[in-house]
Amino acid sequence: MRNFFLFLVVVSCLMVTCKNIETADPSPRSTFTKFYEGPYSMQATALDKIPDGFVLLANTIAETSNGSIAQTVLIETDEKGNRIGDFHTYDNIVSKSFKAIISNGTVNGYIVVGDRINVDPTAEQAANVVVSSMSVLILNGSFQELRRIYIEDKKAIGAGHPVKDDFFGESINLTGTGGAVILGTFKEGIVNQQNAPAEQLLFGLNDNLDSAWVKFYPLLSNTYSNARSIHYSNGNIIWASAIADVQGDFTSSYVTVPFVKEESVPVNFSTLGETSSQKFLPKDIQPAASPAFGFGVVGTYSENTDGSEGNIFFLRVGTNGSIIPGSDRYFDGTLSLTTPTLDKNTSELVDEGEAVTGTSDGGFVLVGTVKSNPDKNLLVIKVNALGDLMWMKTFGGGGDEIPVSVTEASNGDILIGGTNNLNEYASVFLMRMDKNGDLKN
């Protein structure tokens, strides 16, 4: 069914360092592209490594005798991408992120974070027709649901509280001591709900995975748009966001990296682009292979606030949460083939950055999309530790390929999870390429 996904070719292999990364590998690689299809469209949201395989997270809308229902789906595979068991589905949650709880090489459970959407078409206030609550789904190692935790507005609707507050779950990471920290957003319930700014919140789980604390981070009249990941180390919490001024289809935004102590205010709040007008949206932040080298951030930059002529950007963040001056790099799907160091406002194609991972050689792999009318194709970029381009490759076929996560396998292979959209039907894909971005099926 997936003959349409004939990968066109690697469109480039651009080397800009003197070191040859084509080192001989003593054992053959096993690369692949796998698709996971259900009776309904599925949109991927995350990928995580587990011992001897991988787990993908997705969302679907299932049809029931009483209408349609939102479901989140977990898909387990082996190292070769072969599905293990059935799809694991959970009703009434729209998932955004998850983490496998692993101890001594065994998966003991999963935590899934997302939203529960309550719909009341008879609500007196239009803003109360759809109300969102943060949903935290706790599973055991066999994918059985143990319980759910909600962050929600429990106040009764009345004259002093005519509109419910909205809470959204976005990303999660483990603390290393049995607990977890969750990043979300909060919108105050006001009559003109669509204009309420999105404020950040952190939600902590203790080592029993019970609610422990909640901390809010308000931001006057602007709104936050968070990247898809959060990280925790020794009581320090770091993530990436855009601070945005949204006016219809136009968004003027700049990058910020909050760095906070658990249950405290930010101790660092590094920014980039604060004094200029542009669309600057981080989508992912991940640590370098060596913790001493901090983090890499990927996203989309456009000189135009409508997002046209966008480029993929990459920047580095130090261990204290400070954006490293001059570390930002910009990539275009065609111009970067001949101009490795590209001016941020020079763009030929519309490119969007989606996910990043640190690699064992000290560099990073960035994944995103490049617009090739009428479709979006997958764009994979390898940079060194400084963010300088090493190679860039494009894969495409029928429909749109939208990556949501990238990670490095133990042997250096690159794993990418995402969604393929074709003719209004969406399926989940998992791609495994070698460390040079080659598919050797």
Image (cartoon, helix red, strand yellow):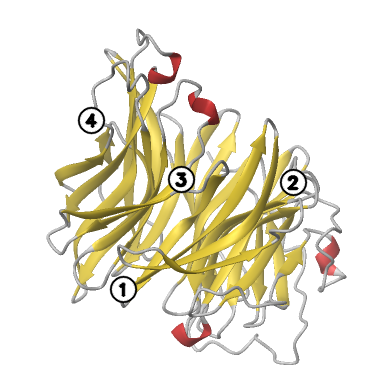
Lower sequence index among marks 3 and 2: 3
Q: Which labelled disc corresponds to residue 154?
A: 4
Three-letter residue code for mark 2: Lys
Q: Is the C-beta separation of discs 4 and 3 under 8 Å? A: no
Q: Secondary structure at mark 4?
A: loop
Mark 2 or mark 4: which is in front?
Answer: 4
Looking at the rendered structure, which numbered label has been put on residue 235? 1
Circle 1 residues within 10 Å: few <14, some 14–19, many ≥20: few
**Residue receiving disc 2:** 371
Distance (Cα) linking label 1 and label 3: 22 Å
- Where 185 sits versus 177, above or below? above
User: Residue 414's x, y, as percent?
Assistant: 52, 69
In the rendered image, residue 91, in percent from the top left (x then y), is placed at 26, 32
Is 77 situated left or right of 336 in this image? left
- CA separation in Å, label 4 and label 3: 19 Å
The span from disc 1 to disc 4 (Cα, nearest Å) is 30 Å
Question: Along the horizontal axis of the image, is 61 left or right of 142?
Answer: right
Image position of 425 with respect to 214: above or below = above
* Mark 1 touches mark 3? (CB < 8 Å): no
Q: Amino acid at mark 1?
A: Gly
Which quarter of the figure has residue 135? top left
Q: Nearer the viewer, residue 73 or 78?
A: 73
427 on left or right of 121? right
